[in-house]
Amino acid sequence: MIPNLEGWHTAGALLLAAVGTYVCRAGGVLLSGHINQDSEIFRWLSAVTYSMIAALTVRLILMPTGALATVPVAIRVLIGAISLGVMLVKPGGRLVPALLTGTGLMLVYGLLR
């Protein structure tokens, strides 16, 4: 009798992805003591990272897919602006309260709609 091996492909892919992720993380931990975080390359990487996050956020607000596309643009922009305001209330930004605000407002809109 041949056992059913259909689930093994998914489990194998998950295992390989986890191993690859943790090998890279372990390498980062080993190298972290030897890297100058104030170097020009890290400032460039930080700028690229922030610009990608900003672009993806704007795309999500202005050109969403799925259920978010059913929410009017004005509502999405308003909720985004309120969340940004929450983040900018204190110097240094408050990312978690801003994310919770945006998520909560979108949830309230969905429930009232």
Image (cartoon, rainbow, N blue to C red):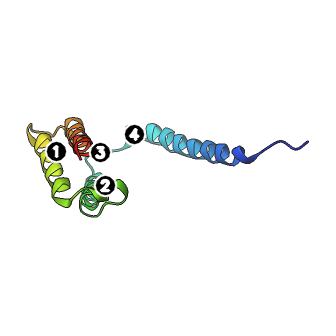
Sequence-wise, which precedes: disc 2 or disc 1?
Answer: 2
- Classify residue 29 as left or right of residue 46: right
Q: Tag 4: residue type?
A: Ser
Dot 2: few (<14), some (14–19), or many (≥20) neighbours within 10 Å?
Answer: some
Which residue lies under the disc numbered 2? 68
Dot 3: few (<14), some (14–19), or many (≥20) neighbours within 10 Å?
Answer: few
3D distance between C-alphas at marks 1 and 4: 33 Å
Contact, mark 1 vs mark 3 (Cβ under 8 Å): no
Q: Residue 54, how many percent across, how many down?
A: 24, 56
Contact, mark 1 vs mark 4 (Cβ under 8 Å): no
3D distance between C-alphas at marks 4 and 2: 39 Å
Disc number for residue 83? 1
Residue drawn at (28%, 62%) of the image: 59
Task: Examine the image and state in which quarter residue 86 appears.
Answer: top left
Which residue lies under the disc numbered 4? 32
Sequence-wise, which precedes: disc 3 or disc 2?
Answer: 3
Contact, mark 2 vs mark 1 (Cβ under 8 Å): no
Contact, mark 3 vs mark 2 (Cβ under 8 Å): no
Sequence-wise, which precedes: disc 4 or disc 3?
Answer: 4
Disc number for residue 37? 3
Helix, strand or loop at label 2? It is helix
Q: Tag 3: residue type?
A: Gln
Q: Nearer the viewer, residue 27 or 103?
A: 103
Q: Nearer the viewer, residue 61 or 90?
A: 61
| Quadrant of the snapshot with the N terminus | top right
Question: Of discs 1 and 3, which sits in the foreground?
Answer: 1
